[in-house]
Image (spheres, grey):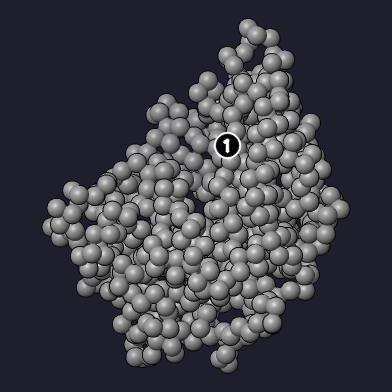
Amino acid sequence: MRKLALSDEILLSVEKPARYIGNEVNSAKKDLKDIDIRFCMCFPDVYEIGMSHLGIQILYDMFNRRPDTYCERVYSPWPDLGNIMKEKNIPLFALESQDPVKDFDFLGITIQYEMCYTNILQILDLSQIPMLAKDRTIEDPIVIGGGPCSYNPEPIADFFDLFYIGEGEVVYDELLDLYKECKKKGMSRRDMLIEMAKIPSIYVPMLYDVKYKEDGTILSFTPNVEGIPSTVEKSIVMDTSKIGYPAHPIVPFIKATQDRVTLEIQRGCIRGCRFCQAGMLYRPTRERDVEELKAIAKEMIESTGHEEISLSSLSSSDYSHLKELIDFLIENFEKKGVNISLPSLRIDAFSLDIMSKVQDIRKSSLTFAPEAGTQRMRNVINKGLTEEIILEGAGMAFEGGWQKVKLYFMLGLPSETEDDIKGIPQLAEKIAERYYEIPKDQRNGKCNITISTSFFVPKPFTPFQWAPMCTKDEFLGRAKLVNDTMKEQLNKKSMKYNWHHADVTILEGILARGDRKIAKSLLRAYELGCVFDAWDEYFDVNKWNQAFAETGIDQDFYTTRVRNEDEIFPWDFISCGVTKRFLYNEFMRSKEEVVTPNCRAKCSGCGVLKYKGGVCVENKN
């Protein structure tokens, strides 16, 4: 019988003790005598969020296929348990074995969003692992960062031994094999990291030096050890048929945020939205074989008992075998009560036909993401949607039986005007008008339109990485203008408006484009009690402002400042395939309000042709 790391008394005193006991269906169990490498995979947020993340499921499955490796999991303890562990000096533990994380060879942390950065420090602190990489010894685990935020690792570089840039299936086996060799040779921690840094896609921050100009921008970024590459190339899987997939995903004991199995149908996106980081990082688009997906879907449903399957993609409508796959899923699972979830669909006749097959139209809402209220602004961001397409799609949806619509927009986009802001509720009004054009006896009651706006944050490796952000007051002023304009609309009773928190957006902007100087502020914020910053009930802007003030950080330098064309960015040493020249050209095209065609329509020369594969090459003009 497994001994739990927490007593019954502690478990009964915290919210949702099932977060910490492990032993779920399909979780890995191995005998420690038979393995050489212990790897603890971490999602730095609460269990329910982390259990919904596909990337960890993929790596967990991949690592545990190795007979010499045992991969376990850890998530951020909710503050109730976090405080108890700190007070009673209980080290953070992995779910599978309940052993302390500090006893593992590796701690791999997936970094999906900037607002989890203080949670990373909580993980290290509760694990009793020195928070600063320079303070660790050969006795401590090697701390690895990965995921989208690792494409600008600099704000958190001081806390990580290395970062894995790109898709995990490519060089992790090489990294683990090298670790075994280095361990046998009795190498020092530093020498081991130097050898690891020679593997493509591996970035070891302590082996690079940053120099700054008087104005605070970067003068140079160079390796301080011979044989280390000056540019770190992302790893990418070009042939998706050669990689495995977790057909037996772990089934949580409690309801996860996304309580379903996830089927990844493709990677990348052919669209070129200028605000979208994922669309640039994961180029080119690579589709999974539809016959393989059918087999995996059947096995996942059988191995988990889940009652919903979600198709994962940045733009599901662009998957060329979508109809065939959906028909298969309906034929095999509909009578068994399994629902099919289709996120990231474009609203057109094809998508609406598919959605009508898999959704209860009277209960479900339709999601549009126009992102901007006017055509001028949609051209600026290269959204590729005209008002005609939006209204036509809404009309077809209403005629098909839908009456609930969610509309997603961004405020604070580059060159945004008052007319663009007012265009958001005005577009919602036109959509409502389209609904009420349908004869009353053919409608499903009143039209319900929910308008949601987030505030724009420029991200690395996007054309808008040069763009300044709005101030907090500017963001809130724009949200107020949307709200006031909505109240003037004829169909205002059919509309509801939600907007994001401006303070959180400002912090996200600082962390997204930050450099190594931000690390001291992060550490100070954690010392002041910041944790779970993505959660409204725990985010404390006053503590963050205090941390920035005490560490001498000018917040405006990272947010509202205008960047020059030739400025060296903290992330410029990383190659994601898309060239900086292409991104800047797209930034200039945004100012001219020029639309760039998608990758199936025309090759735009972004740079990823070098990978020799994917949709962009197959359809190159």
Q: Secondary structure at mark 1?
A: strand
Residue 513 shown left or right of residue 463 in the figure: left
Question: On screen, 147 above or below 470?
Answer: below
Q: Callout 1: few (<14), some (14-19), or many (20+) C-alpha neighbours within 10 Å?
A: few
Total marks in image: 1
Q: Quadrant of residue 332?
A: top left
Instruction: State the residue in front, 440 or 362.
Output: 440
In the image, farthest residue toward the top: 441
* Residue 313 in picture, x, y percent from top left: 57, 47
Instruction: State the residue in front, 296 or 72.
Output: 72
Question: On screen, 276 above or below 121?
Answer: above
**Residue plotted at (32% across, 63% down):** 72
**Residue plotted at (46% across, 55% down):** 540
Residue 81 shown left or right of residue 361 in the figure: left
Q: Is residue 539 visible?
A: yes
**Residue plotted at (33% across, 74% down):** 129
**Residue plotted at (57% across, 45% down):** 500
* Residue 179 in picture, x, y percent from top left: 40, 81
Please identify the quadrant where the C terminus is shown.
Answer: bottom right
Q: Which residue is mark 1?
A: 498
Q: Quadrant of residue 29?
A: bottom left
Please identify the quadrant where the N terminus is shown.
Answer: bottom left
Instruction: State the residue in front, 497 or 46.
Output: 497
In the image, farthest residue toward the right: 592
Question: On screen, 28 above or below 548?
Answer: above
Q: Of the residues shown, which amino acid type is indicated by label 1?
A: Asn
Q: Is residue 270 visible?
A: no
* Residue 251 in picture, x, y percent from top left: 33, 46
* Residue 224 in picture, x, y percent from top left: 57, 90
Instruction: State the residue in front, 495 or 73.
Output: 495
Question: On screen, 360 above or below 545?
Answer: above
